[in-house]
Amino acid sequence: MPIKLRSFDVVIGMDWLSKYHAIIIYDGKVVHIPINSKTLIIRGDRSKTRLNLISCIKTERYISRGCQVFIAQVMEKKSNEKGLEDIPVVREFPKVFPEELPGLPQVRQVEFQIDLIPRVAPVARAPYRLAPSKMQELSNQLQELSSTESQGQRYSQDCFKMRYGHYEFQVMPFRLTNALVVFMDLINRVCKPYLDKFMIVFIDDILIYSRNKEEHADHLRIILELLRKEELYAKFSKCDLWISVVQFLGHIIDSQGLHVDSAKIESVKNWAPPTTPTEVRQFLGLVGYYRRFIKDFSKIAKSLTELTQKTRNIFGEKTKSQPSNC
């Protein structure tokens, strides 16, 4: 008696494929399986899919809702990595690249502060409730802190309350509002004598440029000596030293000038065709970043810009006339 079974997915191993002499055409996503005197041809899905990226805010929102989330950090492993002692000039300043921070920083000429209205009491709020597992993790992290007592100046404005007492930041955390602005102000003041002469600073990124190797050695030594004097530190694994081509703020910089990152060009080429005015705006926002490299960019993008207008409802017309292709 024939029984109709629903379709289901299977994973076919090498033993089965070799037993039935299957032929796999990888570039065409096609499998040929000989059956008696005929050949069964199985064609795979050839549609191109684009990786959907989400922001950190959306990720945190999904986690708070209890969604199952798998997060992986992709890092480029550099081959033939050199140690600190192998790089000229840099090996003279090992204290600038410590494995662990030596302690709290000195009092800076720029200090972070939160100006409050005088004689206004802080908002009374109970600590967040945590699950027992998270409470244990919180206790473990508090034990790893160097000290929970006051060291130097106290900043009562950023004090926070928890189950195990009150705690205050001893250094400025980047997540506070305007913290990045204050940090960049400090770096600009420290590096003021050399800004736009042979170095550029953007928040915590420092770019040093020179005409030749001899000049670059002098410039590099000046900046490292300055960082050591001001007790500012760098992470050696994140530094690119003595290179002729550098990627900085989304651009490629070399001796010939400023160029567009080839990886970003590929993202534009592989962008899926927009189907709504919102997707057209997203695409224009991406390519609009490169208008400085494209002559008459506005004229080229004029037809796409017109699609974002409410009076041009070509997407709706296409949807009504061809509902099966949507």
Image (spheres, helix red, strand yellow):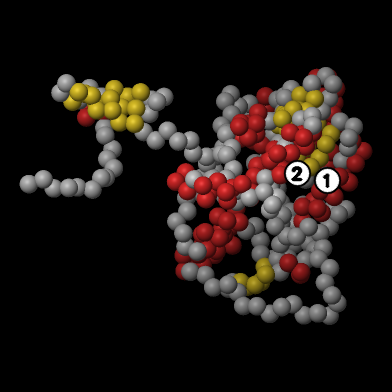
Q: Residue at (26%, 45%) from the top-left corner?
A: 8
Q: Are marks 1 and 2 in contact (CB under 8 Å)?
A: yes
Mark 1 secondary-structure assignment: helix
Give the crowd class for mark 2: few <14, some 14-19, many >=20 residues within 10 Å.
few
| Residue 321 visible in this rendered orientation of the protein | yes
Q: Residue at (51%, 47%) from the top-left corner?
A: 321
> Which residue is more in the foreground, 291 or 302?
302
> Which residue is more in the foreground, 101 or 283?
283
State left or right for residue 231 relative to residue 23: right
Q: Quadrant of residue 74?
A: top right
In the picture of the structure, the residue carrying the numbered disc 1 is 187
Q: Residue type at mark 1?
A: Ile
Say which label, 1 or 2, has the lower sequence index: 1
Q: Which mark is residue 204?
A: 2
Q: Quadrant of residue 61?
A: bottom right
How many numbered dots are placed on residues in this image? 2
> Which residue is more in the foreground, 297 or 59?
297
Q: Residue type at mark 2?
A: Asp
| Residue 140 visible in this rendered orientation of the protein | no
